[in-house]
Amino acid sequence: MVSVSRSIPYEEIVDSLNKEDRLVIVSCNACANYCRTGGRRALATMSSDLKEDGYNVIASEVVPKACILSNLRDVMLPDEADTVLMMACVSGLRAANRMFSGRRVVSANVTLGIGYYDASKKGSVLVSPYPGHQDEVGKAFPGQANMDAIPNGGAAR
């Protein structure tokens, strides 16, 4: 089972941030990694793009699974951090809101529903959609539309 997600367009993410924010990026290396909305590569791209655009990224970390509270307990947020950008599904986002209370938590992804990983399609296939995403059933993520939402197509600069 995989939580299937799509990246929120970069422009929308930065619209929810302030350049004065002391930002920490936390990226899930499980389901979000399969969808290329998390993991090391997506984190490196997001961090680089935000820094290049003048945002104050003070730390970043990849966690094995963001939806597991003990994984988030291991994240050492700098004391001055006031905003956490989560590159995870809605379960990881909710866990982060619980673990990082007192800090603003912003999502980089929208969760479409539940699916499975298909190596031949190099992505996660949506099987059980959340409301509003029924028309996405059977599609693999990342698809081209998803890659277009990631700055530089998810490729490192």
Image (cartoon, rainbow, N blue to C red):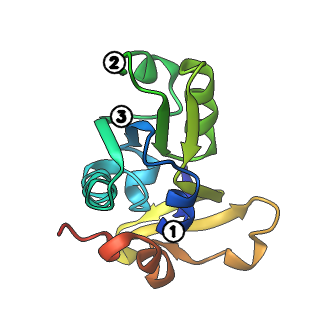
Residue position for label 1: 11
The local crowd at label 3, few if under 14, some if 14 to 19, many if 20 or more residues have their Cα within 10 Å, is: some
Quadrant assignment for the C terminus:
bottom left
Question: Which residue is pictured at 58% across the width and 53% down the height?
Answer: 16
Sequence-first tag of 1 and 2: 1
Residue 18 position within the rendered picture, expressed as x and y whole percent measured from the top left = 50, 48
Residue furthest out toward the front: 20
Residue 154 is tagged as: none
Residue 89 position within the rendered picture, expressed as x and y whole percent measured from the top left = 56, 47
The local crowd at label 2, few if under 14, some if 14 to 19, many if 20 or more residues have their Cα within 10 Å, is: few
Residue 129 position within the rendered picture, expressed as x and y whole percent measured from the top left = 73, 63
Sequence-first tag of 3 and 2: 3
In the image, 55 versus 10, the foreground residue is 55
Q: Nearer the viewer, mark 3 or mark 2?
A: 2
Question: Which residue is pictured at 68% across the width and 74% down the height?
Answer: 137
Q: Amino acid at mark 2?
A: Met
Does the rendering let one see residue 144?
yes
Q: Is residue 157 above or below residue 63?
A: below
Residue 5 position within the rendered picture, expressed as x and y whole percent measured from the top left = 55, 59
Sequence-first tag of 1 and 3: 1
Q: Amino acid at mark 1?
A: Glu
In the image, 132 versus 122, the foreground residue is 132
Question: Which residue is pictured at 38% across the width and 21% down the height?
Answer: 80
SS for dot 1: helix
State how far apart marks 1 and 3 are (Cα).
Answer: 27 Å
Residue 76 is tagged as: 2
The local crowd at label 1, few if under 14, some if 14 to 19, many if 20 or more residues have their Cα within 10 Å, is: few
Residue position for label 3: 64
